[in-house]
Image (cartoon, rainbow, N blue to C red):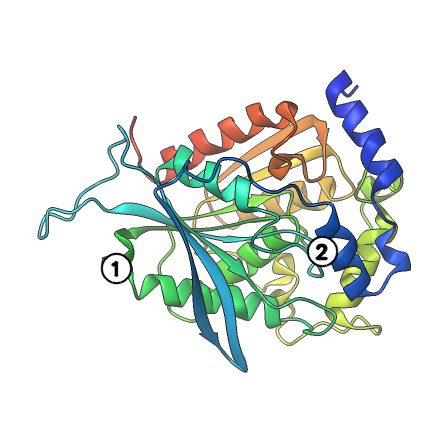
């Protein structure tokens, strides 16, 4: 059973959030943008710098968050004596269709501060104008860009992690495979937060939570149609969009897999965590049965904060950031 705050917020979302499957991608973006809440605490990190990253076919934006100096032991470059923080490359959610740097600004600020890490939030190109695997290639390009600038960013090349929520969790999982198969950069971890894993949409949780839980089964199928195209053709290789269909998951970086229980995506998240573990990948799975999809990055909801704090603690351990 959901607690009172979560249930009330869910009812509000169900009443006011548009049925995206009835819209065009542009209309869905406009409707989502209109509901964004501007950040109110803009000095909670030392800097939040917008940058431009070259990609195949043009450029994309990104935002680099650097935290204030803290009491955490973030590691040092023994040669230069400079503080070296972990690097987190983050991909936002939004069904591959909407959301942007602003929609996840509050979460990225808190993530940077809580983990004492430099966070690079990626404004990857969106569907349906840019079909799969453009978004994954953009996030991989951002990983390459950031990994070539460890001195400039003050980051540690041995503590690089990719992370994402929802569709962004899919991109983080896919980019982990890309980094393995394209000989780098080396990753210390991947954090998959309510991740979209497979376009089949055929697990039992898709029936259980098909309607009334903010992220609906109909919306998920529409997101995949925008990303893959009307015929839903998978690229070659298929793991560029469906990481669980890779020939092997062996050799991937340790994973933190966060799953919300009241979510059509619940079962595919659990199944992917099991696949990773079966391939010998260290996996920490956190299941929050009383939360629904997206709550980890809804910063105005207090009920999600305990799950976020647990995530930050898990990432600090994975990235060897001591208190």
The spot of residue 130 in percent (x, y) is: 67, 74
Viewed as shown, does residue 26 lie left or right of 170?
right
The spot of residue 26 in percent (x, y) is: 77, 65
Give the label on residue 95, or none: 2
Can see residue 209? no
The spot of residue 192 in percent (x, y) is: 56, 46
Residue 292 drawn above or below residue 20: above
Quadrant containing the N terminus in the rendered view: top right
SS class, disc 2: loop
Residue 147 drawn above or below residue 42: below
Who's the residue at 11% across and 46% down the image?
81
Who's the residue at 35% across and 41% down the image?
67
Residue located beneath label 1 in the image:
152
Who's the residue at 44% across and 45% down the image?
254
SS class, disc 1: helix
In this view of the protein, which residue sits in the foreground, 209 or 267? 209
Viewed as shown, does residue 254 lie left or right of 300?
left
Crowd rating for badge 2 (residues with CA inside 10 Å; few <14, some 14–19, many 20+): many
Who's the residue at 71% across and 68% down the image?
127
| Mark 2 / mark 1, whichever is N-terminal | 2
**Mark in the foreground, 2 or 1:** 1
């Amino acid at each position: 059973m959901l607690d009172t705050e979560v249930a009330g917020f869910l009812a509000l979302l169900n009443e006011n959030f548009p049925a995206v499957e009835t819209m065009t991608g542009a209309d869905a973006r406009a409707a989502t943008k209109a509901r964004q809440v501007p950040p109110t605490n803009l000095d909670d990190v030392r800097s939040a710098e917008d940058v431009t990253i070259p990609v195949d076919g043009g450029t994309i934006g990104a935002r680099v968050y650097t935290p204030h100096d803290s009491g955490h032991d973030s590691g040092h470059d023994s040669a230069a004596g400079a503080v070296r923080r972990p690097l987190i490359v983050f991909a936002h959610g939004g069904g591959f269709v909407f959301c942007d740097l602003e929609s996840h600004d509050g979460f990225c600020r808190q993530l940077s501060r809580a983990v004492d890490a430099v966070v690079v939030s990626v404004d990857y190109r969106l569907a349906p104008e840019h079909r799969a695997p453009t978004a994954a290639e953009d996030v991989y390009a951002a990983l390459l860009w950031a990994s070539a600038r460890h001195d400039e960013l003050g980051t540690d090349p041995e503590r690089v992690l990719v992370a994402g929520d929802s569709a962004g969790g899919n991109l983080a999982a896919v980019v982990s495979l890309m980094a393995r198969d394209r000989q780098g950069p080396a990753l210390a971890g991947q954090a998959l937060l309510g991740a979209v894993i497979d376009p089949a949409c055929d697990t039992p949780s898709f029936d259980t939570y098909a309607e009334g839980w903010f992220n609906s089964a109909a919306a998920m199928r529409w997101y995949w149609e925008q990303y893959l195209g009307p015929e839903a053709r998978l690229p070659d290789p298929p793991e560029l969009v469906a990481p669980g269909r890779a020939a092997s998951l062996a050799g991937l970086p340790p994973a933190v897999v966060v799953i919300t229980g009241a979510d059509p995506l619940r079962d595919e998240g659990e199944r992917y965590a099991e696949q990773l573990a079966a391939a010998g990948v260290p996996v920490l799975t956190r299941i929050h049965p009383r939360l629904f999809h997206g709550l980890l990055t809804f910063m105005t909801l207090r009920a999600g904060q305990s799950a976020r704090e647990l995530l930050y603690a898990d990432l600090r351990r994975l990235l060897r950031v001591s208190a």
